Image (cartoon, rainbow, N blue to C red):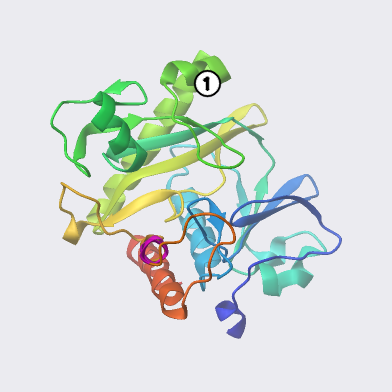
Amino acid sequence: MAQHSRIILDTDLPGVTRRARGKVRDVYEIDGKILIVATDRISAFDYILPTGIPDKGRVLTQLSVFWFDFLGSLAPNHFVTANVDEYPDPLPRYRDQLEGRSMLVKSARMVNVECVARGYLSGSGWKEYQKSQSVCGVALPPGLKESDKLPEPIFTPSTKAQSGHDMNISMQQAADMVGAGTAEKLRSLTLSIYTRAAEYALERGIIIADTKFEFGFADGELILADEVLTPDSSRFWPLASYKPGGAQPSYDKQYVRDYLESIRWNKQPPAPPLPEDVAAKTSEKYKEAYRVLTGKDL
């Protein structure tokens, strides 16, 4: 189908209420439910680039749908359907913008804490460990190297930043924000979901080094929401080339970041466009992650 190779950077759904436009997703409200559309936008260093990544939105949506189904027994979630034929009117008439890259979900009151699980020492966790031998108040053994596997996965919550970087917080700070009972439930859900997914991925040759979940309340129940275990919300490393002691190649924006570093972009707007080959290689990485994890082609 030709529409699948179209790069969609913006959606326009006349007659449907738009609630938000994120870095990647456009969010609409209809009949008391939420429609989440993953575009092909990509952000790096906190800025949205002018170049889209072919099929990226489809990978993010289809992978989330896969995980919602896979993890359903561990945590209830907000997913309703990704079948455009089942969407309320007037959505089906915008099929060319929605097919394969959108999902209809329950409306939830979102918890204001990003729930991060880390099984390996990388990114901001590695930076923090070098200073304090701990991450988000969780003490870790001395002598760990960058990308080392942790003795056991840890829960490292952060605040949701509307712009710029999320800030890491301690479990106590999370409890102060959302209440001790909810914080404890977030911690146990985050770690059980991560552990189950990481074991599954490892059997297929992908290390999930860390990932970020979002939860919300619907009908008084804590549910898993937003996107789940995608290359945008997680660090996926190929097991075959895993070697602790430095940064790892990954199934995500690696090509984009490397290119932007190579041209010495000052990380201020406007963000530069990407060459076609960088966009194509990045698209291939996203699709490969989908293929390896689900066993299916997009």
Q: Is residue 3 left or right of residue 279?
A: right
Secondary structure beneath dot 1 equals: helix
Q: Which residue is mark 1?
A: 182
Q: Is residue 46 left or right of residue 209?
A: right
Residue 16: give x, y in percent of width and height: 82, 57
Q: Residue 37 falls in which quadrant of the image?
A: bottom right
Q: Residue furthest left?
A: 143
Residue 279: give x, y in percent of width and height: 46, 73
Q: Is residue 198 above or below residue 249?
A: above
Q: Is residue 129 located in the magenta-colored stretch of the structure?
A: no
Q: Which sits in the foreground, 226 or 294?
A: 226
Residue 273: give x, y in percent of width and height: 53, 71
Q: Is residue 3 above or below residue 81?
A: below
**Residue shown at 41% from the left, 62% from the top:** 264
Bounds of the magenta segment: 257-262
Q: Residue furthest right?
A: 15
Q: What secondary structure prevails in the magenta region?
A: helix
Q: Is residue 227 left or right of residue 188?
A: right
Q: Is residue 188 left or right of residue 200?
A: right
Q: Residue furthest bottom?
A: 2
Q: Which sits in the foreground, 138 or 290?
A: 138
Q: Is residue 90 above or below residue 153?
A: below
Q: Which sits in the foreground, 80 or 63?
A: 63
Mark 1 Cα within 10 Å, few/some/many (few <14, many 20+)? some
User: Label 1 sits on what residue type?
Assistant: Thr
Q: Is residue 260 located in the magenta-colored stretch of the structure?
A: yes
Q: Which sits in the foreground, 224 or 125?
A: 125
Q: How many marks?
A: 1
